[in-house]
């Protein structure tokens, strides 16, 4: 028998039985023949057994293959992914049921070239990609679309049979329409966000609103694929909106077209509802009417949103199209974002403009007050000054932040200790108030005086903050205050001088006039001339004065028509206000001194005053000289009193000049040089103010008109209103001498108002100032009654008289009998 080993070979004898094999080899020939007949049968039996085993194994494999085919068929039929199996010639071998719906493949198409099928999916790259897959075994994919616009990811994979060879290609189509839409939306959102960022950058520049509006509507139309976009501004009154910016509209409408702000328009409805409004079909819209602007352009769909807050809207932003459109929430959000950005830009520009205006107003105020600004960083101790503050403290403009110690070094040594105390207190309290700070300056004229004030900002636990403040040049105010103090001393000095002058004039007049009446008349006129000089001094403070007039006013009490002891020579010269004021003081001191101690104290004394414009090494200057002769010999020692201070120090300083004073044996000599810039170069016809003119005044010599007999005027009842008792009694006496009946006198406004109601009054003489009250209410009452009245005053009160009373006659104190008679005549005439 043949076992299951190789065919034609006998099984070897088992070990341990060599004798049996030998016996068999020695069997007779008949036995061997039988064995040979049995051998084929054994082999056949063995082959049958092997075939039965193989058949069993093949049946198992067939069953496995059928199960695999069933699984594959169920897999292919259950998948929703269209899949097509192609051979190397790209013929269809197999496909899934999902392929039928998408590609319209039928079972009869098996074996057909895939490219011969009617195209249901656009894929021009398919043949190229399939050839590459067959060549290199690498998969390929691409995004393709069917006729309805659905998106698919087409994949081509190599079809392998178990070996290295590629037997074909597997085609799959995975629908990604939803993913594609989401990606498109994300891309659209990204582009819209970039557009908002671009507008934001533009809004931060100095672009005009029109430029910003123009770019905003362009971006809206571009990113929402709409033909029209608009920026509408709500006009004052809230009745209409103006088209400030737009794209797509007819030429000439931007800047001119108006839209109703009510339900007659989409924009108006948007304002009223205060929420975004989306329109899908404007012709069928029932919430509001289509405005002419939209209807005439064939608008169908659009979005509109409010620009600004609901309570105070600035306007409306809209985007429209002449096609039916379906806008989503992202589109609405994009339009609203642009609207919000536009409002922020508008508000920012308005704020910047207001800040600029405020800055300009602040700068004008600082310039008007001659103030500079500074900032002190408390932590670092460094100070930043603006240009004016730098100049005020003596630093070059634009020096940058400097250390506080450097600023302190600019102060005089005696000011340092007080400065440190003030700064320590300012750091502690957060406030600095330094009303008078003295700092040196290079130019002559004394120190500069500054007022420094500041407040701390931003102080908290983490930082000390900063102090900001102002510095103001108060040098002029300080000097004016010092000048006023000097003038007060001068006033006191003058009162005493006036008494001495009256005494000197009375003595000098008495030597020449033995008749009492003539003496009184001459004396009154000269005293009046002195009063005129004081009025001229007051006027010259502000408008300037002629030098000759100043001299004439000061020397008038000492001159007369029949004397030549006063000589004045020089060209016409107008002094500036400050120079005129100072020069008046000097002339007054010179004249007073001459009357008290010099040449004018004698009848044969002489005074000469002269001036001229000369050229010197220092430039063009005015030289003035005062010389006395014929007076008593000066005393050996002359004290430097107030008069000498005025002549030798005050006047030269104010005029920027130099003065020389000498006491010659026959009288005083005084010379002063000062720059031409103290002179006003006025036209010949310029109006120069002179003292308030007196009624009935005489010549410079003061010869007032004597009282005429009382019979020339009828007796009048004249109300006297005067708060100075001596002056009131003088008026009463003069009126009685003139034959009139005085009423009063009233020393207060209330008393005057009461007396003004008396019957039989004919006229009134009113002092303008009554112990601080104005007499004008009484003047109004007298005018209502139709009573004539005139004014008297010891001040230059003409500018203070109301316009309605400026045509009334008036006289100045002191006055003479003739002045009062002239006043009464004027009242009777009126």
Image (cartoon, helix red, strand yellow):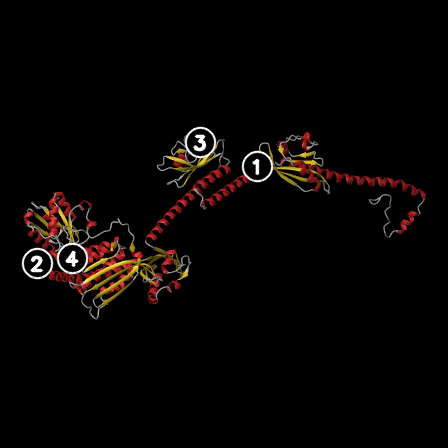
Q: Which mark is residue 177?
A: 1
Note whether 361 is above or below 646 in the view shown: above
The image quadrant that residue 421 belongs to is bottom left
- Most distant residue in the bottom direction: 636
Labels 1 and 2 touching (C-beta < 8 A): no
**Residue position marked by numbered label 2 in the rendering:** 516
The image quadrant that residue 453 belongs to is bottom left
Image quadrant for the N terminus? top right
**Residue position marked by numbered label 3 in the rendering:** 294
**Residue position marked by numbered label 4 in the rendering:** 560
Disc 2/disc 3 C-alpha distance (Å): 107 Å
Q: Nearer the viewer, mark 4 or mark 3?
A: 4
Q: Position of residue 70 (x, y in %)?
A: 67, 36
Which element type, helix, strand or loop, lies under badge 2? helix
Disc 1/disc 3 C-alpha distance (Å): 35 Å
Q: Which comes before the other along the chain, label 2 or label 3?
A: 3
Q: Which comes before the other along the chain, label 1 or label 3?
A: 1
Disc 4/disc 2 C-alpha distance (Å): 18 Å
């Amino acid at each position: 028998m043949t076992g299951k080993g190789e065919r034609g070979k006998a099984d070897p004898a088992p070990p341990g039985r060599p004798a049996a094999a030998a016996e068999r080899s020695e069997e007779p020939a008949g036995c061997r023949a039988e064995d040979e007949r049995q051998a084929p049968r054994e082999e056949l039996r063995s082959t049958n057994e092997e075939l039965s085993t193989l058949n069993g194994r093949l049946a198992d494999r067939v069953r496995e293959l059928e199960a695999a085919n069933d699984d594959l068929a169920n897999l292919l039929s259950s998948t929703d992914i269209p899949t097509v199996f192609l051979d190397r010639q790209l013929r269809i071998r197999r496909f899934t049921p999902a392929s039928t719906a998408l590609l319209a493949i039928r079972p009869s198409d098996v074996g057909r070239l895939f490219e011969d099928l009617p195209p249901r999916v656009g894929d021009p790259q398919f043949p190229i990609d399939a050839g590459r897959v067959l060549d290199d075994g690498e998969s390929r994919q691409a995004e393709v679309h069917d006729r309805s616009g659905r998106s698919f990811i087409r994949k081509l994979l190599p079809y392998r049979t178990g070996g290295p060879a590629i037997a074909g290609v597997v085609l799959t189509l995975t629908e990604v329409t939803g993913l594609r839409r989401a990606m498109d939306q994300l891309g659209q959102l990204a582009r819209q966000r970039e557009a908002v960022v671009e507008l934001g950058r533009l809004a931060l520049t100095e672009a005009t609103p029109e430029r910003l509006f123009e770019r905003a509507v362009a971006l809206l139309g571009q990113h929402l694929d709409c033909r029209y976009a608009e920026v509408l501004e709500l006009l004052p009154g809230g009745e209409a909106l103006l088209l400030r910016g737009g794209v797509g509209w007819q030429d000439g409408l931007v800047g001119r077209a108006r839209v109703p702000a009510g339900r007659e328009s989409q924009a108006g409805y948007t304002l009223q509802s205060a929420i975004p409004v989306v329109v899908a079909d404007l012709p069928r819209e029932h919430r509001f009417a289509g405005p002419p602007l939209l209807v005439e352009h064939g608008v169908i769909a659009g979005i509109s949103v409010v620009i600004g807050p609901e309570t105070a809207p600035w306007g409306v932003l809209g985007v429209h199209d002449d096609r039916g459109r379906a806008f989503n929430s992202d589109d609405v959000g994009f339009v609203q974002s642009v609207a919000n950005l536009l409002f922020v830009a508008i508000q920012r520009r308005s704020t910047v403009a207001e800040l600029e205006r405020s800055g300009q107003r602040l700068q004008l105020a600082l310039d008007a007050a001659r103030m500079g600004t500074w900032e002190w960083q408390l932590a670092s101790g460094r100070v930043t000054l603006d240009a004016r503050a730098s100049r005020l403290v003596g630093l070059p403009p634009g020096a940058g932040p400097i250390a506080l110690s450097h600023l302190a070094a600019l102060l005089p040594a005696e000011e340092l200790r007080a400065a440190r105390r003030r700064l320590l207190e300012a750091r502690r309290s957060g406030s600095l108030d330094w009303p008078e700070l003295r700092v040196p300056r290079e130019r002559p004229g004394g120190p500069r005086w500054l007022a420094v004030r500041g407040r701390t900002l931003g102080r908290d636990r983490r930082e000390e903050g900063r102090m900001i403040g102002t510095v103001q040049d108060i040098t002029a105010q300080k000097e004016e205050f010092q000048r006023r103090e000097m003038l007060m001393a001068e006033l006191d000095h003058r009162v005493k001088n006036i008494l001495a002058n009256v005494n000197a004039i009375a003595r000098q007049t008495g030597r020449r006039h033995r008749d009492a009446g003539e003496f009184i008349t001459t004396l009154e006129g000269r005293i009046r001339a002195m009063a005129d000089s004081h009025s001229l001094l007051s006027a010259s403070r502000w408008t300037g004065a002629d030098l000759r007039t100043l001299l004439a006013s000061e020397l008038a009490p000492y001159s007369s028509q029949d004397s030549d002891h006063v000589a004045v020579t020089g060209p016409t010269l107008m002094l500036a206000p400050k120079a005129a004021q100072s020069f008046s003081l000097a002339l007054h001191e010179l004249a007073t001194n001459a009357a008290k101690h010099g040449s004018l104290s004698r009848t044969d004394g002489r005074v000469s005053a002269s001036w001229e414009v000369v050229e010197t090494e220092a430039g063009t200057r005015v030289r003035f000289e005062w010389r006395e002769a014929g007076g008593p010999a000066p005393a050996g020692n002359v004290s430097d009193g107030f008069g000498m201070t005025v002549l030798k120090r005050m006047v030269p300083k104010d005029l920027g000049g130099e003065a020389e004073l000498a006491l010659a044996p026959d009288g005083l000599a005084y010379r002063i040089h000062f720059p031409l810039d103290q002179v006003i170069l006025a036209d010949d016809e310029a109006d120069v103010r002179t003292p308030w003119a007196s009624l009935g005044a005489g010549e410079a010599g003061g010869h007032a008109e004597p009282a005429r007999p009382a019979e020339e005027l009828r007796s009048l009842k004249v109300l006297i209103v005067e708060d100075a008792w001596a002056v009131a009694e003088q008026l009463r006496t003069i009126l009685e001498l003139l034959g009139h009946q005085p009423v009063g006198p009233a020393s207060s406004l209330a008393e005057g108002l009461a007396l003004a109601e008396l019957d039989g009054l004919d006229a009134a003489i009113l002092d303008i100032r009554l112990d601080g009250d104005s007499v004008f209410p009484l003047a109004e009452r007298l005018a209502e009654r139709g009573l004539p009245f005139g004014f008297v005053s010891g001040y230059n009160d003409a500018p203070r008289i109301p316009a309605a009373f400026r045509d009334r006659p008036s006289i100045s104190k002191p006055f003479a009998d003739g002045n009062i008679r002239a006043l009464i005549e004027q009242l009777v005439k009126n």
